[in-house]
Each structure stands twice: as structure tokens, then as C-alpha cells.
Amino acid sequence: MTHSVESRFIAIISGALLVVVAPLFTLFLALSSQQAAQGISEHVDVVISSNTQALGKPLWDLDSDSIRQVAQMLVADPMIHAVQISDTTGKLNIFESDPGLTADLSGNEARSQAIVYKSVQGLREVGTLTVYIPVASWFSGLHQSELAFISIFIVAILTVFGAAVFGNRMMVVRPLMRLTAAIEATRRLGSRHHVDWRSNDEMGRLAKSFNEMQALLEREERELKRAHQQTIEIYNMTPAMLFSLTTGDTIAAVSDYWLQATGYRREDIIGRHFPDLVYPADRPLFDKRRQATAGEGMPIEITVRFLCKDGRQMSALIAEADLGAATGHPAGSLSVMTDVTELKQSELRNHQQAISDHLTGLLNRQGFEAALDRHIIDADRLGTRMACLFVDLDRFKAINDNHGHAAGDLVLQEFVTRVQPMLRNADTVARLGGDEFAIVIVGEDTEQRSGELCQQIMDMFEAPFRIEGTSVRLSASVGVAFYPEHASSAAELLQKSDLAMYARKRDGKNGAKVYDPAILTRTREKAEIESDIEVGIAANWFEAHFQPIVSIESGMPVGFEALMRLRHPRKGLLPPGPLVSVAEENGTIGEIGNLILEDALANLNRVQRLPSLGNAYLAVNFSPLQFEPGLPTRLAAMLAHNGITPDRLVVEITEAVLMHDDPQIRRVLNELHDFGCRIALDDFGTGYSSLSYLNRFPVDIVKIDQSFVQSLIGGDTDVERKSRMLIEGITTISHKMKCKVVAEGVETEQQRRQLMQIGIDFAQGYHFSRPREINDLLADLSGSAGMNSIAS
């Protein structure tokens, strides 16, 4: 310490002298030597100039004595050390030097000048004068007084330097040495030593501050010792399993309660690697516990199986806090361990119940989706394929409706009993809900096995199911999707197999279908139509177009059929077929029918104002969903609002409405008929047509399906003959039942003439007019030209 401070102080002073004094002294000597050299040079130049003139005549006469005298006179000058005089002819070469000098003139400077003589012939160079003068040194220009001044200056500098070193030693180094001794004693002995130094300067204040700090630290150490003792007591007395780990996960401390719960002894457990006490399968999880919260300083919670002293496993919830998170430096951790063995067992039971179907014991949808995720991970790892079969029982609802839900449960259990022997151990089967099941097939022969299993499921239903002494027959629709060809995730794979199953149902049920991208296209188209319908209902995009129904003989309009259209603001006028199909499937056909009915009655109100159309009737198609008890009352109000008599409204129904002989529909139809509305049976002759409909329901008009009308000119004479016979038969029977007959789909004049010969009352079709928007129709009907065009 002393050597270091003092040597640095000396180095600083020496550096200051070198930086300031040395350059100034050097500059002084340089200027002095330069001035001395300049004086010598000027003196020598004068001497040489004057003596070259004096040597001209002697050299011309070759007077060696005179020349030597001049040389000796020059050497006598104290600033000239040697002289050399030579003539141009080489006969004379006189050299004279200062006797007190050595013969070596290498350290002298030679100055030469030519000697000229003015002869009769003019100026002639007769020789050369060379003098050797000393080179001026730094001290050569100094006088004695200057040397004395320099000596005094050097003595003063050395005196100041010595005084500074002595003062530094007395005022700085000594108190520092005492301070260092106190610090070393504190470090070695552990007690707080004070510095024995008193002064009013900075070192005194430093010593005083150090002594006060030592006293403060001594008090804090006593308090820390008391706090540490209290912490140890709290640590051990807390009724919780506390333990502390080092940064390397070595056990640094454990509480008494921890020892009591685990069975270990403190001397055996301190210093052990904690992961060694964790169940081997859970050690990787414990080692990676800090990765999720790295850098966040948040407490870590993890559940692992802990190995107790007696060999039992304890499910332990460990909450760990990093003790170095606040300081940013590694300092180990403090953890609390809680025995959650019973809780984990309870959670396991609850989880098993949550993913299982209580009726069949299979996985439910939640459990199946988790299993499907695992199967996909394995398939990606092994590079194999897998198949998902979506099974839906056909006509299962009828069993619940006719035999009760208990019988349906028995059928589901029997189905599972029959399916399970067909599966391998690696396969997974689940009940997704209701009568829907899913099966996952894994392995190399996935495609072949899925086809075989689908066939086995189909064959399984050949044997009837026995419930409560009764045999019932079922079938199944199966959709198949493969991973990774058809899907990239578990949810997508299940969705694709579901879509394939519904496609199989649309194709007639009782079979299997492999997913095809066209299925998704149709599904998306259906979803788009559903969206258009939903928005169309809310935004009132639906409108009723009118197609005239004309007298078969005169061609004059007697009525109009209201046909549904949707005018999309971007797509334009959409065809009704896909709309009706989707609306009937999702149940919105009733809302659409009500909108069309309101618009159609408003349009008829406008049409009836035209000449000869005041009694024209309106035929409106009704969906089964519209036959609610309040329909007659609502119709009466709408007819009155538009000024239309009930007999001018024809309620068109299809055979599907009458087929199930719903008592409510029968009651509503009778009320409408009693109110004065007429009933028309649409598309008669197709589907499940039955003449009993004409007897059991109040039918006023029979509409012959257009397929019979178009067959009249199909080119096949046998088909034409049979179609004509059917039309004649329907017409004759309808007239006998006092029903009017309308032929649909008339497209040519030839068809019209044949129908007129048969005795058809009315007709409609493209031959007379296409369905028209009300404004266009009114524009055509307003003039005689429009009326004639329909009549023709």
C-alpha cells in the first residue's frame, strides 16, 4: 500500500518535471548554442574575408614565409583551431594548427574561400584558404554566470521534490497505512477495529467516517445474527415442508416438518442432489421446470412424484421461488413441498370419468380428440398413415321414439359389443354422442383395414338387434378420412370423416364413403347458401315472382303462381332450387314462405287493378312448417289488408305435406278451406302419389307434374302413349272429384294442343311465360300487346 501510493506520487511529480521543466531547459540550451554558433560563424567569415585579400600577393609571388606568418596569425585566433593554405599550382600547401589541440580535426567544421589576386591580366584565383573552427555545443554558448544560475535552479527543484515526497509520506501514507492495518485486522480477526488517527484535514475525516462505519456495521451484524437465529427457528417450526436448494439443485437446508414427512435425517440429506429423490420418469420434467418462466422472476409450481425414505411415492406439489431473482445474481431457491397424493388420485378418477362415456364405457368426444392428437403425433414420428371412421346409425331416432330411450341405450351397448371384436389393440373407438361413433385405425395396412372394417360393420347389421323381446333392424352410414392425405390435424380429420358420413347419408344411407374434396366444396356451397338465406331474411332480399296460369283454350291468364326468388345485391338473382333444398334442411323454409306470401299478396293487389284481371287467383306453395294453428287467422288479416277475397288464394301443398297425415295440418287445411281458400295438390303423379289424398283432404285443384307433360313429345312413342294415358286418367278422376286440372311445364304449342284434346283446364309453362318480376309483368300486362303475347 505505502510503496504503491508513494511510488505513484513520485511518478506524478517526476512526470510533471519532465513535462514542464525539461522542455524549458532544453529550449534554453538550444537557443544559447544557436546564438554561440552564429557569433562564431560571423567572426570567422570576417577573418577569412580579410585574410584572403592579404594572401593574394604572397601566393602570386609564392612567398612561403609571408604566407606562414599569416597562417600563424590566423591560428592565434581562439575561434580557429587550424589553417590550411594552398595555391592553384600545387607548389605550396601550408598547414598550421593550435598547439594545444590534437591532430584529429574530425570534430571541427571546415570553412574555405578562394584567394584572388588582381594582376595585369585581371583577377586571377591563386589559391584556397581553409580554416577549421569548433562545432558549437549546447553548453559552449553559456557564460559562467549562466551556469551558476542553472545550478541554483536544479538545487531548488530537487529541494521541492524532496519536500513533496516527505509531506506525502507524513500526511497521506501514514494514515493510509493505519487504515489498511485496521481493515486487515477486521478481515483476519472478524472483529471491528478502529483507526487511531486524529486530524482536521481530509484524512482525519476519512478516519472518523471509517470508525463510525465500523461501529454501525458492528450493530448491524449483531442484529443480523439475531434475525438469522429467528429465521432458522421459523424455518424449522413452520408446519410446512420447506427446503432450500443451491443453484446446482443441491439441498442446502430442510425444515423439521420436511424431515418428519419424508422420513429422512438432516445429516443424510444435506448436500444431496434433489433430483435424485424424484421419481426417475419425472426427473426430466423437474430439470426443465425453469424454462417456462425463464427471466420472468415468477414462482415455479410443478407436481412430481417424490421418493420417501421408506420407499413410498408421494405426489408432491413444489412451489419454488428463486432467491436471486431480485438481485439478478444466482442465489439458490426456497421451495414449499405439499403432499397432493390423494388429490392427484381424485383428479385421475375425475379425468377418467370426464373422458369416458358412462353408457358404453368408451371414450367420449373429449377423450377421443385427445387420443386422436396422440395418434397423429405417433404417425408423424413413425411416418405412417391412419384412418378415422365416423359411424352414424340410420333410423336410430325411430327406436327412441317408438320403444323409448332405454331401448335405444340397449341398442348402443349391443352395437359396441359387436364392434369391439373387430378392432386391434392399437385401434381406438369412441362414442361421440347420441348414435355417433368414431374409430381410429393405425398401422401400415390402414387403407385395406378401413375398407374391411366398413364392410364388417355393414354385415353386422344383417342380424337384427333384440330389445325387450322385439327385433329391430338398423343400418349405418360410415364416413372415412385418411391422415395425412385428407387432413393436417385431429380436428380436421374428424371433420372430414363427418362430412363423408353425411355425404353417404345424402346418397341413401347404409354404406361407407371415403372423403373427397368435392364433399367439402358442396359443404362450403351449402354454408354460403345458408349465409345468403340468413342475410336475405334479415335484409328482405326475397321477392315473389309471378308465372301466369292460363286457360288452355284461350291462353288468357286466370291466375298466377308465386315463385320464390332471392335477389342478391352482388350475385344477382339466385336460382330457387338450391335455396329451397337448404332452407328445408335447416328449417328456414317457413320464414321464407311467410315473406313470399306477404310479397305475393301485395303483388296480386297491384295486378288485380289491371283490366280483366280483377278475379285472377294467386297460387302459393306452403311448407309443412307454415301449417301452424295461427295460419288461418294471419291469412285472413293479410287478405283483408290487400283487398283480396279468400277464394282467390290457392294454397299449394305437395304430397310430402299429406303423406304423414299430420292431424294439425289436416285441421289447418280444413279451416282454410272452410274460410274460402282453395287447396291445390302440386306435382301430382310423382313420389308417393295416392288417389286417397283427393278423398281424405279438401283438394280443389290438381296440378299434373311437368315430367308427364314433357314426355308427350319425347320421341319415345311408348312413353308418350303411357304419359297421355296417365294424364287422361288423372284428368278424368279429378273432374269426377270436381277438381280443376292444371298442367305444369308446357313448353310447346304441340303440348298445348294435346293437353287441350285431353281436357286439361289450365296450363302454365315457358310456352306462355317465364316467372316474371312484378314490375316487368305489370309492364307486359298493361298493354294489349302483352295480353296477346300470353294468349298466343
Image (cartoon, grey):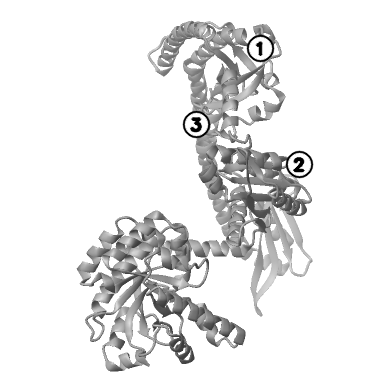
- Of mark 2 and mark 1, the one earlier in the sequence is 1
Q: Quadrant where the C terminus lies?
A: bottom left
Q: Which dot marks residue 153?
A: 3
Q: Quadrant where the N terminus lies?
A: top right
Residue extending furthest toward the front: 736
Q: Residue at x 28, y 64 (%)?
A: 674
**CA distance separating discs 1 and 3:** 75 Å
The residue singled out by tag 1 in the image is 270
Q: Position of residue 594 (x, y in %)?
A: 33, 64
Camera-nearest residue between 107 and 113 = 107
Left or right: 601 as drawn, with respect to 179: left
Q: Is residue 251 above or below residue 741?
A: above
The residue singled out by tag 2 in the image is 424
The local crowd at label 2, few if under 14, some if 14 to 19, many if 20 or more residues have their Cα within 10 Å, is few
Report if the CB atoms under discs 2 and 1 are less than 8 Å apart.
no
Q: Nearer the viewer, mark 2 or mark 1?
A: 2
Amino acid type shown at disc 3: Phe
- Of mark 3 and mark 2, the one earlier in the sequence is 3
